[in-house]
Amino acid sequence: MGWRLPGYRFGFCYSLLPFRTLLKKVIRIFIAGLSVILLVITCRYIFLSAPIITGFFAKNLCSAVFIQHRQAAEVIRDDLSEFPFSLVEYTLNETDSSVSATFWGFAKQKAIFRNYAGAALVFDNNETDLKKHQFVLPQHPLLHADTLPWPYGDKLPDTLPHGIDTAMLKQVFKTEFSKERQTRALLIVYDGQIVAEQYAPGFNKYTPLPGWSIAKSITAALTGILIHQGKLDINANQLLPQWQHTAKEKITLGELLQQTSGIAYNENYLGPSEATTMLFKEGDMSGYIAKLPLKYTPGTVFNYSSGNANLVCRIIRNKLDTNTYYSFPFTSLFYPLGMYHTFLEADAGGTFAGSSYVYATAYDYARFGLLYYQNGKWNGRQILPNHWVHNSVQPSGAGKLKDYGYFFWLNGFDKDHPEKKTFPDVPSDMYYASGFLGQGIYIIPSKKLVVVRLGQHETDINELLKNIITAIQGAVK
């Protein structure tokens, strides 16, 4: 028995060798198959994402060069140098006012700048027709802004309100303009007066800067003006002709403004989604969104959607004739407030991209914030309806976090800690217009503050506003 047992054991080991060989083959086949699957998924992702990457690159470079008048090399270095934009090759044609971009030689996208209509990507639209979008705007008053006192002009008083902690404000600005925060403009308005401002090198108070989703808040203001004029109704439904006899005809204007339209939409910019398709693959943005199906009963679920803002722009366009539509933002809002350096861009279909594409100076963003701070009144004139600002900062019953009004964010509850405020060290009456990469207009009525922050990277808004409040709390007019 002692002799046979080792032999038996060795024989058992030998019998495992074919199994081990087979197992290794299976593992190699599995790894090879998995590699193929991952390669296919990666290639598909790149195939679907490449037009988004080149579209973002071409559109933003075109706007930066022809609206901001920045050098292309500077824009590439400071705004578009990170991966995957570092893989993009581009051609700038100053004669044609266009930018073309490719990703590894394919997924070509071309953006064309049009006078007063801004930059737009060329899709199925005839390029010649797109170039014809040269809007003619009414001339704004010929004023010497430097000689007119703020906010009607740019002239600031020589003294600050007594009691402001200037040393602390300097520290606030030093922190905010550190390299990692990439702030480009910070401006503080206290009790209607600019008390502090600073700009990154290469930028100044005359530089129009992108506001991204600040455009939504401007779209809300334009909606309010038309309601004030009796041309729109916040409770109206049957908003678009193509929605007749469908479930979407029940969507109200108020539900669009509160982001409770129920339309199936995903606000995701990391890859293919309704958001990236709308902005970088569709010429008629609102037309694309209008065709999307309903996912929820209107008014029951909060779902942040840039598409809703572009639908509102389409509704406004349908209410006005062509010439009135393109001049309307300027004659009804920008010019009355002295916002002479504010620029709304239109999509390739000619509708303002009220979700995302606005450029303005820090002064003009501050003027817009001050309009809301003053309950819609400017220089004795009621620009917005009497109760518009109050209604704009009421949260929808569908929003569990109570953090959104009419295209304005509120200081509601934190999504990760719903028992706490989003900004725990900032008064609860604060509301704000917010955009991609940390653009913001923060309005705090109880502290008499309007703060504008613009940049190329998110920042700690709770810390920033808390320190500003501390620095100005002793101010006496």
Image (tube, rainbow, N blue to C red):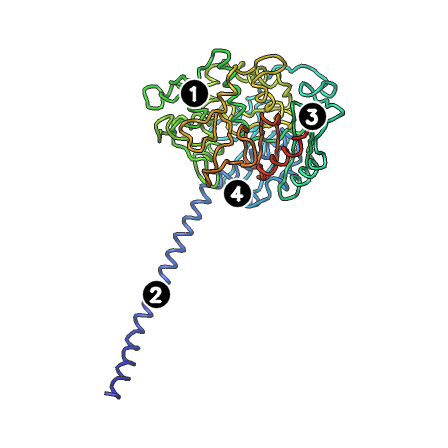
Real-space Cα distance between discs 4 and 3? 57 Å
Q: Amino acid at mark 3?
A: Val
Q: Amino acid at mark 4?
A: Phe
- Tag on residue 476? 3
Vertical order, 5 against 124 (above or below): below
Real-space Cα distance between discs 1 and 3? 42 Å
Residue 168 showing in the rendered view = yes
Crowd tier of the residue under label 3, counting other residues whose Cα lies within 10 Å: few below 14, some 14–19, many 20 or above: few
Write down the residue under mark 4.
Answer: 103
* Residue positioned 60% across, 17% down in the render: 137
Mark 4 or mark 3: which is in front?
A: 3
Tag 4's secondary structure?
Answer: strand
Write down the residue under mark 1.
Answer: 253
Mark 2 or mark 4: which is in front?
A: 2
Mark 1 or mark 3: which is in front?
A: 3
Real-space Cα distance between discs 2 and 1? 62 Å
Give the camera-side residue of 343 and 322: 343
Callout 2–callout 1 Cβ contact below 8 Å:
no
* Residue positioned 56% across, 18% down in the render: 376
Q: Position of residue 338 (x, y in %)?
A: 64, 19
Q: Earlier in the sequence, mark 4 or mark 3?
A: 4
Q: Earlier in the sequence, mark 1 or mark 3?
A: 1
Callout 1–callout 3 Cβ contact below 8 Å:
no
Q: Amino acid at mark 1?
A: Leu
Give the camera-side residue of 172 and 70: 172
Real-space Cα distance between discs 2 and 3? 81 Å
Residue 45 relative to residue 127: left or right: left
Q: Earlier in the sequence, mark 1 or mark 4?
A: 4
Vertical order, 49 against 433 (above or below): below
Q: Amino acid at mark 2?
A: Lys
Write down the residue under mark 2.
Answer: 25
